[in-house]
Image (cartoon, coloured by chain):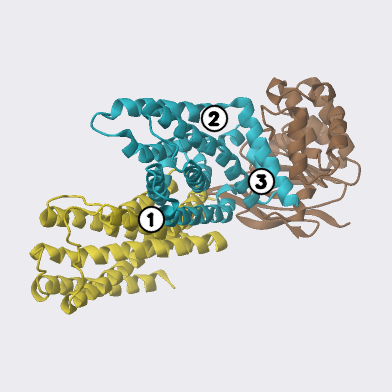
Chain colours: A brown, B cyan, C yellow
Amino acid sequence: MEAVLEARGLGRDYGPVVAVRSVDLTLGEGEFLTVFGPNGAGKTSLLGMLGGAMRPTRGSVSIRGETVSLSDGAWRRRVGMLSHRGFLYARLTAVENLRFYGRLFGLEDLERRIPERLARVGLADRSHFQVRQLSNGMRQRLALARALLHDPDVVLLDEPYTGLDPRAASVLRGVLTELRDGRRTVVMVTHNLKEGLELATRVAIQVSGRFAWEGVADAVDREDFERHYHQVVEDPS
Amino acid sequence: MEYFVQLSAIVWKDLLLEVRSRERIAAMGAFAVLAGVLFNFSIDTTAVRPQDVAAGLIWMTLVFGGLLGVGRTFHIESQDGAMQGILMSPAPKDAVFLAKVIANFVLLYAISLLVLGVFALFFGVDVRNNLGWVSLILGLGSLGFVAVATLFAAISTGTSMAETLLPILVFPLLVPMVVFGAGATGRLMAGRPFSEVEGNVRMLGAFAFAAVAAGAVLFRYVVEE
Amino acid sequence: MTTVGVRRGATGLTLLGLAGLVGLYWLSFFWVSTEATQGVVQRIFYVHVPAAWTAFLAIGISALCSAVYLWLRDDRLDRAAMCAAEGGIVFATIVLTTGPLWGRIAWGTYWTWEPRLTLTLLLWFIFAGYFMVRSATDDPDKGKRYAAVVAIVGALDIPFIHLSVIWFRSLHPQPVVAKPEGPTLPGDMLTTLMFGLGTFTILFFGFFLFRYALEGLRAEADLRARRSAA
């Protein structure tokens, strides 16, 4: 299986602070990796480097063989990131936000695509509402639509369940289940053990900047995993 | 072609946001008018002819007011982390910079014409001489200013001092713009022919060009994480 | 080049520079002829001008190292840029103190908008901005990048500022007509000036190498501390 997302010896320092020590990973098409870990484990930095938003201090990342760097390569079209920060403009409407990103990504059929995507996340009736008029859950749904607008091969999700109301959470679950269509490669960082395990094909626990534990999701029982998680987080050796 | 689409998308987005919030244009516009008022109180108009100092004051008002507005260029992106969204898109970093410069230029040029009007109104300064050339010079000066200020706004936004650092970084660099711009403006407003200030205009143009080019190259190093 | 090697070079250059400085003072006090209009005070010129030259050399070096740093991301280049900038601000300060002293005695005013002095004042602020930006960021790597941009843009702007200041000055001739160095430089004055330029340049590189070696040691110590903590 061809590796879609590959990281070798990936590390990130902020001056004297080592956020990510060294991470190796190889993911193929259709794989869904969920990374669990306590705050400060370097998960956001890891995602940032995988998505080309952050320059690694050590190591490298490649997507379908093309090295990910801070420059503007074609690989940028293949990556979509959903951060809990949303990347949305408060005074633009839902449609305007999507149209803006659509144009940045060079998408052609925006007039058809945008209403479709808004409907998928249940925001069709709020298309012309400005983002500041939307609730938190709606904003996250819009952010999800934005992240997937250009149909990326590689989807990076940073704590997507944070602060979601049940409606938004169920929309997210639905969309994420669709992402497990065998074509995409997903890396999700979350605290939510239940949701994270449900969707994953692979699982990892990140502590102090490295993967303290990795495994295949099917082989993992949820209660066992919860116990194991607390163990590993306490003693990451 | 796609470059143009990406660039115009960002310009349009910035201008649309400005139209909806009116934050920066209101601040800059109010500043332009109020500065004129304060100047009136700070200059003894019996001892000094406003016409003599108008060019300098116009340019200084532009510089201070401009920093007010341009300093916030990246603030609109920071609230929801939107800048990262743009940086992760295929849009080239120099396109992002140029788009910001264009949007800021539109803003500042409009304000510069307002400042001209304010001085005409408040000080009875006769702006009719060479108005076209004066507008051109204000435009060139605004362009150079905006290029420098936008690059350094990106820097200062990333520091703990934020916008307060901006004047310290930018003022020394703006000396050529103020010297050539105010010099040419003063002469033109006094009715001198354009040929006398051609050299100034060329320097302003060269400065603007260098500022835009340097910014386009260096911007990517400022915004990376 | 090992730190020991750098320090040896630094010591050598500094000693040579200090010897040159002694020679320069001797030349400017005892050998060179007195300038006709200003008298003895004009001798400050042989310190003032070389200091200015060195300050501008420093921004050039800093900008060049900064540019290559942004390309290669080697911390040593950033250290070099910073050490050059430090030397630069010191020599710029020398210019800004000798200038007003000279002006006060020679022409009665502390400050004239003389092009070289004005340009050095602005350069001083560019250096100040360089250091402010370095320290105002939490992430040290960000600070290095920002400072590099400040140095590069500053250096690029210097020619523009130079031209603008000269042009401005040509429109507003100061009441005192005397140019700081007089219309043309006679032979012995030129020699002394050249000697001054050479001495100050050597001194600058001596100080620069000392600072660079110190920064290198500091970086090594940081690295060791981090490794033992890990």
Q: What element carries label 1?
A: helix
Q: In front: mark 1 or mark 3?
A: 1
How far apart, in angstroms, are the residues tagged by discs 1 and 2?
30 Å
Q: Is residue B1 visible?
A: yes
Residue type at mark 3 is: Leu
Please, what is the three-letter code of the amino acid marked with disc 1? Ile
Q: Percent position (x, y) of residue A128? A: 77, 24
Q: Is residue A73 left or right of residue A29?
A: left
Callouts 3 and 2 close, C-beta under 8 Å: no
Q: Which mark is residue B208?
A: none
Q: Regarding mark 3 in the picture, which secondary structure is present there?
A: helix
Q: Which residue is drawn at 43% across and 46% down?
A: B170
**Picture disc at residue B87:** 3
Amino acid carrying mark 2 in the image:
Ile
Name the spot of residue B201 as percent of width and height, x first. Answer: 46, 53
The chain to which mark 1 is attached is: C
Of residue B25 and residue A175, the one placed in the foreground of this image is B25
Chain-order first, disc 3 or disc 2: 2
Determine whether B115 is above or below A124 in the image: below
Q: Which percent across, then down, holds residue A174?
A: 87, 30
Disc 1 crowd rating (10 Å Cα; few below 14, some 14-19, many 20+) is many
Say which residue label 1 marks: C161
Q: Name the residue under label 2.
A: B25
For disc 2, the chain is B
Between the C-alphas of marks 1 and 3, the distance is 33 Å
Is A21 situated left or right of C171 in this image? Answer: right
